[in-house]
């Protein structure tokens, strides 16, 4: 009996209780992290408008000061919007990982767990690609800064 | 024996598709963690090279004493880098354990990998909470 169990576990990978609990823990906290992350991004959008209103209320006296503030706020706005789009994208995959995996583990539905793992895989893929893009942009900016200072 | 059969009926297999997704998770988390470690290392090198200049510049801008400011800056930098290192370590650990679990067909390693990933998500949530608190305090400042 013992031999049979060992040989079976050598060739088959199964979601045992320990693995199910660990996966459920990761899915639960992944879902919570996703909600906190998207909340932070939404708050930064609100903060952008609050700060812009504060800037508007200052008396800039027109001229170059006003132009500089306008270009700064439009630059910040693009940054905030790009950040929000990325956050929504990441939230979608992480949230779907959390929901599908938990539902699959609760109902012993391997299809839902598979769907959850697919979303987790996509989440980290998107994150990885964004990091690569970020590094490329940063390197280009650094090169431009160095070449302009020479 | 009957008990074994009934338990196997309710147990789910980790089939080749699931394993492919897990392997993909392992590869990408490894890439992200290693990139994070390299970026942290480069930033530490830059700080070591230009740290004193940055401290002087900020001290002149803030009007604080240079000694006080340098102390505060060093403390903040140590906390931030230690936190980032722990955060990335758990992602790296998760990646390694998931890969090891798939290679050795060992569910204990897979479970440990997901436990490490859970800690990574908890630490991510704490970072988001700090960011939210910073944004709220900025709104009312």
Image: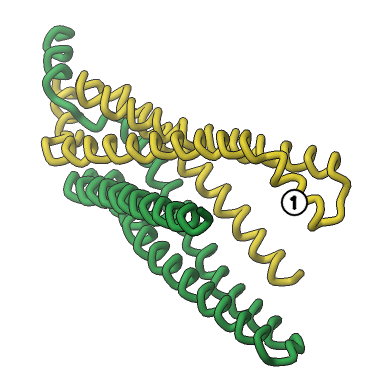
Chain colours: A green, B yellow
Position of residue A92 measured from the top left corner of the image (x, y, whole percent): 34, 61
Camera-side residue of B67 and B21:
B67
| Image: A90 above or below B70 | below
Position of residue A118 measured from the top left corner of the image (x, y, whole percent): 22, 49
| Image: A136 above or below B4 | below
Residue lying at the far bottom of the rendered structure: A62
Q: Where, by quadrant of the figure, is residue B101 drawn?
A: top left
Camera-side residue of A68 and B123:
A68
Drawn side of residue A138 relative to residue A110, left or right: right
**Residue shown at 51% from the left, 33% from the top:** B41
- Which structural element holds mark 1? helix
In this figure, what is the number of numbered marks? 1
Position of residue B56 measured from the top left corner of the image (x, y, whole percent): 77, 46
Name the residue that disc number 1 marks.
B57
**Residue shown at 37% from the left, 31% from the top:** B94
Position of residue B59 measured from the top left corner of the image (x, y, whole percent): 80, 50
Q: Can residue A101 be seen in this view?
A: no
**Chain at numbered mark 1:** B
Drawn side of residue A12 relative to residue B127, left or right: left
Q: Is residue B47 visible?
A: yes
| Image: A94 above or below B40 | below
* Quarter in which the C terminus of chain B is drawn: bottom right
């Amino acid at each position: 009996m013992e031999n049979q169990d060992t040989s079976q576990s050598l060739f088959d990978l199964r979601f045992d209780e320990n693995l199910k609990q660990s996966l459920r823990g990761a899915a639960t906290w992944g879902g919570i992290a996703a909600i906190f992350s998207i909340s932070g991004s939404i708050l930064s959008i609100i903060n952008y408008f609050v700060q812009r209103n504060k800037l508007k209320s200052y008396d800039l006296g027109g001229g170059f000061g006003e132009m500089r503030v306008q270009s700064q706020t439009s630059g910040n706005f693009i940054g905030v919007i790009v950040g929000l789009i990325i956050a929504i994208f990441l939230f979608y995959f992480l949230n779907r990982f959390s929901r599908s995996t938990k539902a699959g583990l609760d109902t012993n539905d391997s299809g839902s767990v598979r769907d959850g793992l697919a979303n987790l895989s996509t989440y980290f893929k998107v994150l990885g690609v964004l990091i690569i893009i970020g590094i490329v942009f940063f390197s280009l900016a650094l090169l431009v800064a160095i070449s302009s200072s020479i | 024996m009957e008990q074994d059969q009934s338990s196997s009926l309710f147990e789910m297999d980790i089939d080749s598709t699931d394993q492919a997704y897990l392997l993909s998770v392992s590869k990408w988390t490894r890439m992200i963690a290693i990139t994070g470690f390299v970026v942290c290392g480069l930033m530490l090198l830059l700080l070591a090279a230009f740290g004193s200049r940055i401290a002087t510049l900020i001290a002149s801008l803030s009007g604080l004493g240079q000694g006080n400011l340098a102390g505060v800056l060093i403390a903040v930098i140590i906390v931030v880098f230690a936190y980032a290192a722990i955060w990335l370590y758990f992602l790296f650990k998760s990646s390694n354990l998931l890969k090891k679990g798939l290679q050795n067909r060992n569910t204990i390693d897979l479970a440990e990998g997901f436990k490490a990933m859970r800690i990574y998500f908890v630490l991510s949530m704490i970072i988001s909470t700090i960011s939210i608190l910073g944004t709220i305090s900025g709104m009312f400042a």
